[in-house]
Structure formats: structure tokens, C-alpha cells
Amino acid sequence: MTNLLKKANDYMFENMKNRGEKYTNNYHYNSPIGWINDPNGFSMFNNEYHLFYQFYPYGCHWGPMHWGHAKTTDFISWETLPIALAPNNDATGNCGIFSGSGIEHEGKHYLMYTDHYHPIIDGHFIDGKDIRQTQAIAYSVDGIHYEKISNNPVISSELVPQHAKVQDIRDPKIWKKGEYFYCVLGSINIAEGGQVLLYRSKSIESGWEYFNTLIYEGKKLGICHECPDLFNLDGHDLLIMSPQYLKPEGYKYWNVHSAVYMVGQLNYETGEYTHQPYDQIDHGFDFYAPQTLLDSKGRRIMIAWLNMWERESHTVDDKWVGAMTLPRELKIINNKLIQLPVEEIKNYRQNEISYENVSFGHELRLDGIKGNSIELEMNIKVWGDFCIDVLASENNNERFRIMYHDFKKLFTVDRSQSGKVTRSFGERTSQEYRNVELELIEQELKLRIFVDKSSVEIFVNDGEYVLASNCYPINEDYNVVFTGASECKIVSLKKWDIKVK
Ligand code: FRU
């Protein structure tokens, strides 16, 4: 183990005992200590699921990136493991292990990641144009200790095509098909605009070659396509990625950066990717850099960073920032992405309370329906506008509001009065609302709402839309309050406590 890796592990294991718990999520994977961003290396090894993540253990801000590590057998209960990778911080200027992916091959667990180089001379970073990002490999035989291979980089700056910037080429997602390994990389075109590059090789550790550019739409689709992932789902080749600074269109892309998917087909002979228009993956405030794996049951499971760049965070006093979404099972139905929380969450349901056929007008509260570590499942018959407040104070002045505006056909989350105000340093759009246009069928709305201590994740109409957001309540009442402009009806409602520990 290098000195820097040992230092980071000693620090993490010593300090994670002292992490504050006020807002620490119960059943979402939560930073053990310090800062986390993107999920990395989400993959299966020896019948367990491994999750790595961008990690700076020493502070509640982004810093020289390590790969933190956790594993699970059911996507809900996680065990935090020793940090897997640390930057070299040597004379070459290697100051970050950026995002990447994982794959099991011939008994080894391989990680493919980006080495970020930004040399320091006399205590100062040199000019940004001298930054380099190259792709590298590490492997493990036990799923705990990871060794960087001596042949790194496996994709050096010399292997970058002329139309791509050598300063911004990162986040390899690797997969195998036939006799080749493939990887997609996020990149910036020298003429500006994001692009996704495809590489291939017959061996993981050497022989990588540029194959084709999958996506390039000039400035239209953001400045860099971070964290691409390409996989086959229900007969389609889906590309997901996280374009930086995508401009808002109608109610979409209101966060400073977005995560989008496209349904298409990759021609493995020519490397050409034909696809339908892109669309937003999640419609809440906090969702970025999703990554997927194929599990042992053949399910495509996606996890994402439950946060957004350039946001104020209220967990700094607790010595952590950042969590992951619930892992979601993906499907394509009528060319549209459908997302559902993994089935396994049902194993953690406790203390079921249910109601049927309850009409509501002004501020209905129901016995037993409250909490900050719960799942709510409901069918609502909609007659006019209504809202459901969660994490609400006794007088309901503080609440995270979930609304349906029947006339405008808009489903909205409103965190304007949800407790500590989350400012954004990057967004020009509202910090209070996120909206989805939603037509109801027979005036029925189906919701599954996952309230965790500082997050609310909402699955609408069997996964047609999902909205993930952070929320920092000050109150400790955690009520659920139903209010309808006219006579809306709860056709059915179930509430469970979700207990993991
Ligand atoms: C996305 C990202 C990646 C990069 C990593 C650095 O959130 O910017 O492109 O590898 O974070 O932490």
C-alpha cells in the first residue's frame, strides 16, 4: 500500500466514527467521512456488488480524488471497505484518480480510471493547458486491495484523436463483447462541445485503440459529456451520460449539469451509433453521473450521485458531504426509460400502516403516517390540484412539498420551505422548484416516495419519472400532510419504516 493510500485509510477509519448523524441517510449509501461525488467501478466481483466513488476523505469539499469503496449483496445494505486507490501526488503531477468503471475478468477485479495530471511548480499549479488526463488500470484478486498495473497509462495522450482535447478526456466505462473490450470516454471537442469517444482492445492491459466518436452535436449538448455509460437493455443500446452546462429547455435541464439518456443501436463493425433524441433521466434537484451494472439476475441496475455540483451543503458540521441514490432497476418500455427502486428495498420494510379510500381537502394527517426514514406507496384519485408535504413541521410552515397541478398537468417538487435553504452557485434557474409535465390516465397518480434523513426520492407512475432531491429539515416532527384544492381521494396508502441497521 502506498503511503498516501495508507494515510487516507488511517484517516477515514479513525474519523468515520465521529461523523455527525443528524442528516446522515439511513438507507442510501452515505459518505463515511468527507466528500464524495460520482459512483465509480460499479460492478460485480465474486458474487458481490462493488461500488467505488470519487472521494476526498480529509474535508467537506472536492480535493485530490481517491476511490472510496463499499460492497453489498443486495444493493441496500452496504459495507464500507478500505479506500482502493489514491493519487501518486508525485513529480509527474498526478493529483487525482478521476472517475471510471470496473469489470470482472478471469478471476480478477479490474478497475479502469482516469489519472488526472496537473503539475505543481514552486507551489503553484501550472497553466491549465498543460493538464493531462490519461486512462489507467488497477486490479485486485481479493476485492479489497487494488494494484495499479505497471503498463499504465493504457490510453495515453498519444492515443487521443486530433479532434479531442488531451486535457479533458475521462471517465472510462468498460465492457466486453465478443473478442473485444470496449470503453466509452467523456471528452471535449477542440472546436468546443462535448463528445463521447469509443475505444477498443483485445486485452484489458494493453493494445487500446481509438475506434469512433459516438456523439458530437457541437455546442448543443453541453461542454463535456462526463461519465458516459453504454449498455444493452431490452434489445437497445442505451447511452447515458452527464453533459455539463446543458441549457434549460422548457421544464427540463434546470440543474447546472444534467444526466441524459438516449435509446439507440451501436454497430460493433463500424463503431457507429444511431440514436433517438436525448432525454433527462431524473427530474429532481440532485442527480448526477449515473453508472450501471448488469447483476447476476440479468437486471440492469443504475446508481447515481445524489447531489449536484456547486450546491451549498448543510452536512458540513457532520463532517460529510454526498450520498448515492437508491439503486434503480432500468427497463425500456415504448422507447422510454423506466426506473424502479430495486426490489430488495422491500426486505427492509417494517411496521406497515395502510389506509384506503380517504378523501382529503384541507391538511389531512393520518395516524402513524410520518417519519424521516420511510417509504410511502399510494394511489391518488386527482380532482384538482393537490400536494403532499413530507418532513413537515407541526404547523406545516416547514415542509418538502410534492404537488400535482391538474390544470397545467405539472408534477412539481418544491423545497422553498423545506428547512435549511440550499443555495446554488451555478444555476440561473429556480432553486425552489423542479417540474415534470405529466398527463394522468383516468385521473390516477401512483407514487412511491422514499424519505430518508436528508433526501426525498419519488418514483411516479411505476417509474415513468423519478425525482431525487436533498432536503435539510430543521424540524423534527417529520409529518406527512395531504392537502387538496377540491376533493382528491387517497385510493390506497401504505407506509413502512425502512430500517437497515
Ligand atoms: C463528474 C466529474 C468527472 C470526473 C470527476 C472528478 O462529476 O467531473 O468527469 O472524473 O467528477 O471528481
Image (tube, grey):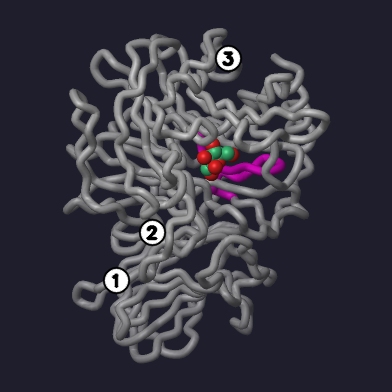
Secondary element at image label 2: strand
Q: Earlier in the sequence, mark 2 or mark 3?
A: 3
Q: Residues within 10 Å of mark 2 (few under 14, many from 20)?
A: many
The answer to whether 260 appears left or right of 224 in the picture is left
Q: Nearer the viewer, mark 1 or mark 3?
A: 3
Question: Magenta residues, as a range?
Answer: 26-40
Residue 34 is a magenta residue = yes
> x%, y% of residue 76?
49, 41
Secondary element at image label 1: loop
Q: Quadrant of the C terminus?
A: top right
Q: Residue at x 74, y 28 (%)?
A: 8
Mark 2 highlights which residue? 466
Mark 1 highlights which residue? 438
Mark 3 highlights which residue? 148
Give the amino acid type for the residue marked by disc 1 in the picture.
Leu
- Asked whether mark 2 and ligand 1 are closer than 8 Å, the reply comes as no
Q: Residue at x 58, y 61 (%)?
A: 426
> x%, y% of residue 428?
54, 68
Residue 458 is a magenta residue = no
Q: Earlier in the sequence, mark 1 or mark 3?
A: 3
